[in-house]
Amino acid sequence: MRIIKSNLITNTVAQLCQKAAYNLPKDIFESLKTAKYQEKSLAQKILKLTLENAKIAKKGIFPLCQDTGTAVLFVELGQQVKIDGSLDRALQNGIKKGFKENYLRKSIVEEPLLKRKNTKTNTPAIVHYQIVNGSKLKIDLMLKGGGAENKSQIKMFNPTASKEEIINFIISVVKTAGASACPPFVVGIGLGGNFEIAPLLAKKALLRKKQNKNLNYKKLEKEILTKINKTNIGPQGFGGKTTALKVYIEYAPCHIASLPCAVNICCHSCRHAGAVL
Amino acid sequence: MKTYHLINPSLKDFNKLKKSDFIYLTSTVYVLRDMAHKKLLEEKVFPLNLKGKIIYYAGPTPKKKGQASGALGPTTSSRMDKFCKEFIKKTGIIGIIGKGARSREANLCQKGKVIYFAAPGGLGALGGNSVKNSKIILYPELGPEAVYKVQLENLPLIVAQDLKGNNIYGE
């Protein structure tokens, strides 16, 4: 057994909050830079401002976006690891500490309908646990803004649905999202699983940095990206060739009767950071 | 697309602006979002004088010591559509800053009275950097959803709907 102290987990999560909120991932920055050269007029001006925003945020005074999001944690816990203390408390304390010390916005309310009282700590964070082999603890933090999350959708297709039907649904989700969800987007797609797994896959897809390992799905990701970029929504919805920067698909086995498809829209500020302990 | 620098503009200054024009705005604005709209419109006596003022749909991050503001950027305007008509009628505001397409009703009640600017979404650092001064003036208990009075200097904006009703997002 390997012992990991809960203090170390808390401090690591707090550091991830700083990293994610103030530093745009390099691959996104590079994609925005490439897009800037392909655009002209207002679209180009917007992308220039977006890159400038990332440079200002990197200095550590202002976070990238005022909506520092719901904290979503993906945790892979090795079977050989023993936590000294409560893992959940260590993670939640890390979010509290990270949001307080780095002046991030507290955007979580206690319950959704009646009083909507702010918890003032940005907790509870949403945590997805996975038990894996080995003796390591892997933590990925995503700061997910509300505007883009509001535009995400799921549809349960018939198993005989064609590729075109699936693509058309994804395009319709992107069109509905429009300017409100801050394009250019990163589009996470979850295919298969069931009603709860497909959205989880779509969310997890947003953590990816590379196209699919499966060549057929890699081809599909490329095809969907090309079609999304023909919608002329463009940066901030003012028109242009760059409506999405990336499309990532995660897939899972599913029932003979089903073909769930979930689309999670992420704004251009696709903020995540990870650590392995 | 023309570029203008506007300093403390009045409704008259907005006449020349056309959809898609690029603006650098220097002005006092009032920052508020969902919950403040709901509370304000439930008040028996409207507690703010916003006549001739510009409002900004947003909720900033907390400011660090010595800073004029935290990060500041727009939230989705369409969530405020249901308050738009009554809010304009009660206040006499002349400008709204937000992001994204609005409902047909909201577009219609802005037409001729209120200009609609889009601030580039997700650029909170750039926005925070354009603030000279900010303070909470109402509903501090709402935290990030309180009403803020903010002095902007050269905030980049795009005319999303001009006074004639021409809209960058289409119908």
Image (spheres, grey):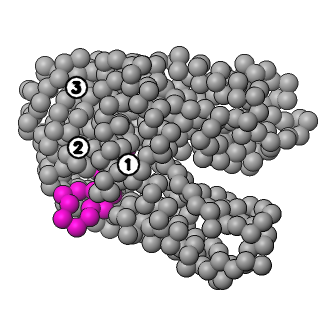
Q: Residue at x 12, y 30 (%)?
A: B5
For mark 1, name the chain.
Answer: A
Q: Residue at x 35, y 51 (%)?
A: A58
Kindly report which numbered mark, 2 or 1, lies closer to the viewer in this rendering.
Answer: 1
Viewer-nearest residue: A39 or A189: A39
Residue at image mark 1? A65
Residue A13 at x, y percent in the picture: 53, 66
Tell me if residue B12 is in the magenta stretch.
no
Residue at image mark 2? B55
At label 2, counting other C-alpha atoms closer than 10 Å, the crowd grade (few under 14, some 14-19, many 20 or more) is many
Say whether residue B102 is left or right of residue A216. Answer: left
Mark identifier at residue A211: none
Sequence-wise, the earlier of marks 2 and 3 is 3
Number of labels in the image equals 3
Q: Residue at x 65, y 77 (%)?
A: A4
For mark 2, name the chain.
Answer: B
**Vertical placement of residue A10 versus B44, above or below:** below
Residue A14 at x, y percent in the picture: 48, 67
Per the rendered image, the range of residues in magenta is: B61-75
Residue at image mark 3? B22
Going by the numbered disc 3, the residue's amino acid type is Phe
Please identify the quarter of the rendering in which residue B7 is found.
Answer: top left
Q: Quadrant of the N terminus of chain A?
A: bottom right
- Residues at discs 2 and 3 both on one chain: yes
Going by the numbered disc 2, the residue's amino acid type is Ile
**Vertical placement of residue A167 versus A262, above or below:** above
